[in-house]
Structure formats: structure tokens, C-alpha cells
Image (cartoon, rainbow, N blue to C red):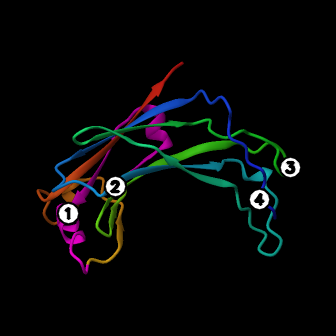
């Protein structure tokens, strides 16, 4: 199955500003980057793969540019209607949906990766993710392994809840 020519919406209107606030981190990060995931929500518009018979829905992963606006705050913009709904395979219109926005806070070989999913983006509900300060401190050592930590929803899930920092992601819909 060949990959269809997926088109970006030239005039997206469903704009959300994403704010990342980092509280209590033991230091700064080498880099802060983001990405947004989209996928087709109705698999019936996609043909079955020849051998397995599975449906592999199209997905797109695009960068989310973040601007450092203050000591521990970053902002970026995403569009829920980034891709054009279209009949890519002759089986009906494929409908794109925003899945989530993810952030990578990189220090040494460690990536701290909070995410905010569509439900929270549309509701404007903040998502707080907690991370271990111990992992941060260990990641700066020369022999530290490369790891990704997606964090935890509650500080109490750590052995030492007082030795954590948080990343809060909030979305605000911006109407034209």
C-alpha cells in the first residue's frame, strides 16, 4: 500500500496555544522541544494490508515550536485542523484528528516527556506530570544511560514525593 499524498490545511482555524510551565526542576534543560501527533480517526477509509489484513491508518508527527517566554515557561501553537480530510484511497473520506502534543525536556541523555491529549486540549484542562529529581541529577553523569521518562500523574507515586518536579501543560483555544 503506497502512502497517500497527505495535504496540510492551508487555512487552519482551530488554533490552540500550548503553555508549558516547569516547577521545581533542579536545573535547566539542554533543550526543550515539542511535537504534535495526528491520525486518521475512521479506519474504514483505509484499505486492508495485503498479507496481514490489518488496517494501518495514516499518522503524522510534526514539530511543535516552543518559545521560551520566561524563566520556566514555554509557549507554542498547534492547530487541531492541520490536515485536510480527503478520500485518499477511494474508500471514503479519511478524517484527521489531533491525538496529542508531547514535549521533550532533554538533560544529558535523559528525556522528560510530558504530554497533553485531545480531551484536555479541547477542555482547556491543565495536565500536570511529575518527574524524579533523582533521575534529573543522574542524567548529567557521563555514564548515564539514555532514557525517556514520561512521568507520573501524581507526586505520591514516587518513593520520595518531595524530591520531584512538575511540568504543567495547558491549552487555550484562540478564536479568530
Q: Does residue 139 sit above or below 90 in this rendering?
A: below
- Any magenta on residue 155? no
Label 2 to label 3: alpha-carbon separation? 43 Å
> Which residue is tagged 1?
158
Q: For this view, does 109 lie left or right of residue 54?
A: left
The residue tagged with tag 2: helix, strand or loop?
A: strand
- The residues colored magenta run 115-143
Q: Which residue is mark 3?
A: 91
Sequence order check, earlier mark of 1 and 2: 2
Asked whether, in this view, residue 106 is left or right of residue 7, the answer is left
Between tags 3 and 4, which lies in front? 4
Residue 124 drawn in magenta: yes
**To which quarter of the image does residue 70 belong?**
top left
Earlier sequence position, callout 4 versus callout 1: 4
Label 3, secondary structure: give it. loop
Percent x, y of residue 46: 78, 55
Q: CA distance from mark 4 to mark 1?
A: 43 Å
Label 4 sits on a secondary structure element that is: loop
Neighbor class of circle 3 (other Cα within 10 Å; few <14, some 14-19, many 20+) is few
The residue carrying mark 2 is 31
Label 4 sits on residue: 3
- Extreme bottom residue here? 143
User: Who's the residue at 22% across and 69% down the image?
Assistant: 140
Disc 1 and disc 2: Cα gap in Å?
A: 25 Å
For marks 3 and 4 on the same chain, the one whose residue lies earlier in the sequence: 4
Amino acid at each position: 500500500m503506497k502512502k497517500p499524498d497527505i495535504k496540510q490545511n492551508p487555512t487552519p482555524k482551530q488554533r490552540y496555544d500550548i503553555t508549558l510551565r516547569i516547577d521545581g526542576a533542579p536545573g535547566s534543560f539542554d533543550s526543550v522541544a515539542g511535537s504534535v501527533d495526528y491520525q486518521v480517526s475512521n479506519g474504514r477509509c483505509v484499505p486492508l494490508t495485503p498479507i496481514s489484513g490489518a488496517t494501518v491508518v495514516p499518522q503524522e508527527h510534526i514539530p511543535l515550536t516552543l518559545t521560551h517566554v520566561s524563566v520556566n515557561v514555554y509557549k507554542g501553537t498547534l492547530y487541531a485542523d492541520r490536515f485536510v480530510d480527503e478520500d485518499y484511497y477511494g474508500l471514503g473520506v479519511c478524517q484527521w484528528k489531533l491525538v496529542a502534543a508531547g514535549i521533550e525536556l532533554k538533560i544529558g541523555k535523559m528525556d522528560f516527556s510530558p504530554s497533553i491529549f485531545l480531551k484536555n486540549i479541547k477542555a482547556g484542562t491543565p495536565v500536570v506530570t511529575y518527574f524524579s529529581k533523582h533521575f534529573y541529577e543522574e542524567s548529567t553523569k557521563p555514564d548515564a544511560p539514555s532514557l525517556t521518562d514520561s512521568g507520573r500523574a501524581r507526586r505520591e507515586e514516587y518513593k520520595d514525593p518531595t524530591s520531584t518536579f512538575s511540568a504543567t501543560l495547558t491549552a487555550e483555544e484562540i478564536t479568530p
